[in-house]
Image (tube, grey):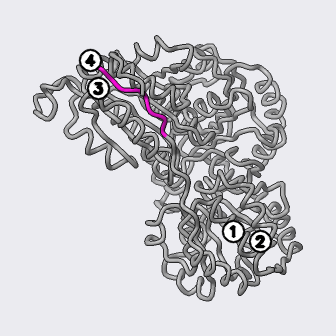
Amino acid sequence: MPMPAKMRAADAIIDSLIVNGVDTLFGLPGAQTYSLFDAAQQRASAIRTIGSRHEQGIAYMAFGYARSSGKLGVFCPVPGPGVLNTTAAMCTALGSCAPMLCLTGEVPTQFKGRGRGHLHELPDQLGILERLTRYAAHIESPAEVPHRMKEAIIAAVGGRPGPAALSMCWDTLGQESEIGPMLYAAVPAPAPADPDQVSECVKLILGARRPMIFTGSGAQHAAPEITALAERLGAPVVGFRGGRGVVGEDQQLGINMVAARRLWPEIDLMIGIGSRLELPFMRWYSPISLVRRLQGRKLIRIDVDPTEMDRLDADGPLVADSAEGVKALLAALDAVGFTPRPDRAAIAEAKGRAAVEAREIQPQVDYLEVIREVLPPDGIFVEEVSQVGFTSCFAYPVYRPRSYVSCGFQGTLGFGFPTALGVKVAHPDKPVVSVTGDGGFMFGMPELATAVQYGISLVTLLFDNGGYGNVRRDQMNHFGGRLIGADLINPNFVKLAESFGVDAVAVDSPAELRPALERALGLGAPALIHVRVPRGSESSPWKFLYPAMGNIHGP
């Protein structure tokens, strides 16, 4: 067994990251974390550090890195206000099952917990982090580093992934001590699916005529298995936001939410895999009509998190990793000689009619068609809380797992651009497009400097309608046209981008977007395309997003 070595706690933290395959640290240095960044700099050949112009930037970049790759996204803010600036991204990761690790400092040991008002002191920082993460701990001494790092990484990556956080006092972080060897965080293999639960699920499948598979964020790693199950059952597969691309819409059984809604009246079995089943239980029906509309339909849920079975009861609960649970189902179906009765013609018809219906949402759909045609099948699309982003939920076909990056149910305005930077860092050889609005883009606009400084060749499509589109529409339609906080005064976005050293151009139509996007993707450098959209000209996508609520903006 290797003997303990004398080193700083900060060195041990960085060595732990390297031992566990982490090659990127997103960080913004400050007094309490200087030694951590110094340790990273001394190991620059093994781990790169990417800074930002705001703590939100490093956290969202780590989120995008994690969400699009499934790998651990690590970020380091200063404690107190720095940590608070990252909490929106942590909350987004918690809701989206994205594995992240926050490494931060604390006030000096002698001041911790005394409320004396030391620099960046935050009352009960650990308590705040505990509410937003799968795991949070304060490292009391350098000797604890290997063990705590292992625990945090396993919590972030294993089971139901999500954010984890570790803090350490300013003085302790730079303290030299004898520290044992760094530990590899081996994630335990998922527990095998319970045979009795599998058997109950098989009975439900055998009794069904028209099953439909719903995929969520927890299904992204199980695409081959879910594709095999869909083919075995002849069942259409729909994902919403985090579940899109598990079975690509370029495949016969991959459908969008509009086509799924058309097929829904004939569906008698829902199979939710790593999903909260937001479409049927939250979006397609109002709570008053929900029980009546679901009557007679059975539900199978496959989820690695047993608490999900308490949040939404299932006729066939199967607590298992998505891939392992589906494999167990396939084996059991083979054992009983299952023969499906698929109606693929109905699925094809629903897909075709959905595509025609969606075309009424203009000009968003025309722009999305151009983006889809220009991007290769594995090109990555990062949405934003915007009119084009909302429409992309159903009108932008997704062909591959993890190629559509969203903020999940948090609806985090402003997440898109910095998140897309992290996506591009994780996938330097793939084309990545950030589709954002003028309102959301301004939240993270200073990260244009980050893109240039670190050579992050992201292409940003900035759709500028001069305001917060949903707010404006709702105030016009439901509040007598009394506008407040809806219309925005914007800069000249082309000149703004160029002032940072970003290649920029303005376009006014889908026809103009095509050559501009093709050129931008070929630059190998940061680029921005300013898409000018007349204020108030966009069709509302909400009739498709929330059929139960018509054109009323959903929650």
Q: Nearer the viewer, residue 336 or 109?
A: 336
Q: Amino acid at mark 4?
A: Gln
**Whole-number angstrom distance, CA of label 2 to CA of label 3:** 54 Å
Q: Residue at x 48, y 71 (%)?
A: 309
Residue under label 4, please give it. 175
Question: Which badge, 1 or 3, is on the more N-terminal residue?
Answer: 3
Distance from Cα at disc 4 to Cα at disc 3:
7 Å
Q: Main secondary structure of the magenta part?
A: loop
- Quadrant in the rendering for residue 417: top right
Q: Are marks 4 and 3 in contact (CB under 8 Å)?
A: yes
In this picture, is 395 found above or below 419?
A: below
User: Where are the magenta residues, as a range?
Assistant: 178-185
Callout 2–callout 4 Cβ contact below 8 Å: no
Mark 3 crowdedness (10 Å alpha carbons): few <14, some 14-19, many ≥20: many
The location of residue 396, given as percent across then percent down, is 74, 50
Q: Quadrant of residue 215?
A: bottom right
Residue 199's x, y, as percent?
A: 63, 79
Name the residue tied to disc 2.
235
Which mark is first along the chain, 4 or 2?
Answer: 4
Which element is circle 3 on?
helix
Q: Please name the amino acid that badge 3 sits on.
A: Pro
Residue bearing the label numbered 3: 142
The amino acid on which the numbered mark 2 sits, given as a three-letter code, is Ala
Disc 1 target residue: 213
Q: What amino acid type is highlighted by mark number 1?
A: Ile
Distance of label 2 from label 1 (alpha carbons): 7 Å
Tell me whether circle 2 and circle 1 mark residues in contact (CB < 8 Å).
yes
